[in-house]
Image: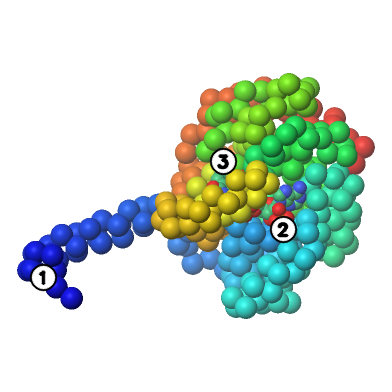
Amino acid sequence: MFSSSGCLFCDLLYIIPLITAFYFLRQYIRGGQFKENVRANGKIAVVTGANSGVGRALCEELNKRGAKVYMLCRDEKRAAQAREQLVENGCNDSNLLIQTVDLADFSSIRDVVKILLTEESHIDILINNAGLLGIPQFEKTKDGVEKTWQSNYLGHFLLTELLLSSLEKSSDPRIVNVSSIVHPLADSIDLDYVNNPKNYGRMKAYSRSKLANIMHSRELSTRYPKIKSSSCHPGNINSNILSTSGWIFLKDIFAPIFWFCFKTEMDGAQTPLHLALSQHLKGNGLYYSDCVVVEESEKARFDGDCVKLYEQSRQVVHKWL
Ligand SMILES: NC(=O)c1ccc[n+]([C@@H]2O[C@H](COP(=O)([O-])OP(=O)(O)OC[C@H]3O[C@@H](n4cnc5c(N)ncnc54)[C@H](OP(=O)(O)O)[C@@H]3O)[C@@H](O)[C@H]2O)c1
């Protein structure tokens, strides 16, 4: 009941500034917020990795702003649970549609695109958000591609290629690639190199795919100037991103620290949301963090390398185009 000094007023002199400092630190960690009062009525949005983390939060915001949202998820059960939760949170359930897709399987991407193109005359917003981090050992997909590379980058590349004509029919088309601040760690994005087990490392594989996400956006903006293509670092988020790595237990052990030091999933959704909806986007092909343009690493800025990556990616997926 009593303060240690015996003087409540003296203790408050310490406690109040401490609480204020924690509050402002926490606000700082939450990062930039999308504050424009923009509706998305009538817009058709497609979000990958929609059952968890940033993707689920994006679906919630887009839906609440009036968009019809296709939740692209690889697991039907997890997708249904996420959808149920979003409806409980106030989303309009008739505007929240699940489609299953495994980005690590080109045939499943083509199947989902067939459905989307049959259902919709056009698509306004594509958010390439799904991602995994930290597969312990080198693994190839059934398409013969290193798994992180295909799940995070090449699968999204194919999905985007197959939806381009539909996006071009929109009056304000947007493509958002969710990358990461670790992209400068990438050593090479050459497929032969990426696909060589000798060059595998958990973070290396992840950073390569995230560098490719940015270069993809840059090249899209050159080839398809009508479409606003952007990439972003969503922030460091208290999500399930470690679930593939075997390190997810850290989230439970250090729960309070994670809660304080990382963004919430909704905070993580703010920058991609800004790129999907803002009426004040400047330029095209740019990289963002906390809702503002930031400089991507030098490796992402060589136009010739962006062209090369795009052409090489098209060659790998050509039979699915
Ligand atoms: N968390 C961070 O601190 C952080 C930092 C920088 C960038 N990012 C990026 O933010 C994006 C979202 O991550 P998050 O933090 O929200 O992680 P998350 O909660 O783990 O969500 C990732 C989503 O991607 C899905 N996914 C993974 N592999 C897939 C595949 N082959 N096919 C289809 N879906 C697949 C997951 O599905 P399942 O649930 O079925 O596994 C999940 O829905 C990722 O691109 C990540 O790289 C995150």
First in residue order: circle 2 vs circle 3: 2
For label 2, count other residues whose C-alpha is less than 10 Å away and answer few (under 14), some (14-19) or many (20+): many
Q: Can residue 251 be seen in this view?
A: yes
The answer for how far apart the CA atoms under marks 3 and 1 are is 47 Å
First in residue order: circle 2 vs circle 1: 1
Tell me residue 28's x, y (percent).
36, 52
First in residue order: circle 3 vs circle 1: 1
Residue highlighted by disc 1: 8
Q: In this view, does 216 lie to the left or right of 269?
A: right
Tell me residue 198's x, y (percent).
73, 21
Q: Which residue appears at 74% of the width and 43% of the height?
A: 151
Of labels 2 and 1, the one closer to you: 1
What's the residue type where badge 3 is placed?
A: Ser
Residue highlighted by disc 3: 180
The answer for how far apart the CA atoms under marks 2 and 3 are is 20 Å
Q: Which residue appears at 76% of the width and 25% of the height?
A: 197
Q: Which mark is residue 46?
A: 2
What's the residue type where badge 1 is placed?
A: Leu
For label 3, count other residues whose C-alpha is less than 10 Å away and answer few (under 14), some (14-19) or many (20+): many
**Viewer-proximal residue among 238 and 275:** 238
